[in-house]
Image (cartoon, rainbow, N blue to C red):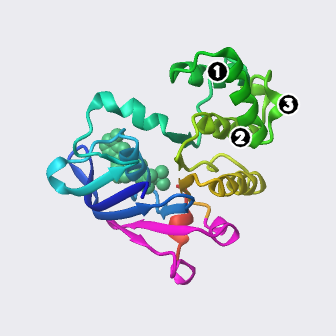
Amino acid sequence: MLIDYHKVNIYQQDKLILHDVDFHAEEGEFIYLIGKVGSGKSSLLKTFYCELDLPQKETEKAQVLGRDLKALKRKEVPALRKEMGIIFQDFQLLHDQTVYRNLRFVLKATGWKDKKKIDQRIDEVLEAVGMADRKESMPHELSGGEQQRISIARALLNHPKIIIADEPTGNLDPETACNIVKLLKDITTTGTAVVMSTHNIPLLDRFPGIVYRCKEGLLSDVTKEYANLDLTEDEATM
Ligand SMILES: Nc1ncnc2c1ncn2[C@@H]1O[C@H](COP(=O)(O)OP(=O)(O)OP(=O)(O)O)[C@@H](O)[C@H]1O
C-alpha cells in the first residue's frame, strides 16, 4: 500500500480540521478528493508530503511509501518527496527559465549528474505529456494547460510511485481540464497512483476513480454513492 492512514487527526495550528481519517492508496489507483471550500482537502494532501505535521499522539497509523510518518525525521523528508510528484493549481514553474531548464533544475537538485541521462529523461517526460517540441519555450509562451503539462512532466521526472495534485485543473477551462485529467488518469496505467483534489465534479463521471469526500471534519469514501449526493457545495469554488 502506498498510503495507509488509520485514525489520523489533522490540525491547522490548534484547529482540528479532519478527525479519525482513514485513507488508503494503492498502486495505480486514481483517487479524487472532493469537499467544499475550506473542508480540509489541501490540509490532508499536505500531510502526505510532510508540509503539515501530524500530532504523534493522535495518529494511530500514518504510512506513506513505506515510511511511518510518526517516526519520520525532518532530514528524511526530501528522500520521501523525491518518490512523489507534486502538482499545484498555479503550476509553480520558474518563470525566467525555459521548460528544459525548469526540468533540469529538479533533476540536478535531486542528485542527477550525467548530462546525457538528464537530457534523455527530460525528453522522455516531455514526450509523455505531449510537449516534446516545447523544450526551449519560456513558461509565459505556453497556455495554462500547456504549463500544467510541464508541471506534470516535472512531477514525473523521478519515476514517482504517487502523484499528489492539489486542484490541478483549478485555473483551466473545462476542455483543457478534461485533457489534463485524462493525462493524469493515463499515468495511472503505468502503476503510479494519483490523488487529486478538485471542485470539478463532472470529472468524476468522465474519468471514474475512487472518491473521498471531506465534510464537517470527516473524510469518507463515497465512491459508491457520490452520484446520489448533493455536491453543489463541493463544486463551488468561492
Ligand atoms: N496555514 C494555515 N493556518 C491556519 N489555518 C489554515 C491554514 N491553511 C488552511 N487553514 C484552515 O484550514 C481549513 C482547511 O483548509 P484547506 O486549505 O485544507 O481546505 P480545502 O478543502 O483545501 O479548501 P479549498 O477548496 O479552498 O482549497 C480552513 O478552515 C482553512 O482556513
SS for callout 3: helix
Q: Which residue is mark 1?
A: 104
Q: Which residues are magenta?
A: 201-229
For the residues labelled 2 and 1, the Cα–Cα distance comes to 16 Å
Residue 133, label in figure = 3
Q: Is residue 93 above or below residue 42?
A: above
Q: Earlier in the sequence, mark 2 or mark 1?
A: 1
Measured Cα–Cα span from mark 3 to mark 2: 13 Å
Compare residues 40 and 5 and report the one nearer the observer: 5
- In the displayed structure, would residue 153 be above or below residue 20? above
Q: Label for residue 149?
A: 2
Q: Quadrant of residue 218?
A: bottom left
Eye-nearest disc, 3 or 2: 3
- Single out the residue that lies furthest toward the left: 57
Q: Looking at the picture, which amino acid does disc 2 mark?
A: Arg
In the image, residue 95 sits, relative to residue 168, either above or below, namely: above
Q: Inspect the magenta stretch and tell me whether residue 98 lies in it.
A: no
Q: Amino acid at mark 1?
A: Arg
The answer to if 210 sits in the magenta stretch is yes
Q: Residue at horizontal 55%, vertical 62%?
A: 29
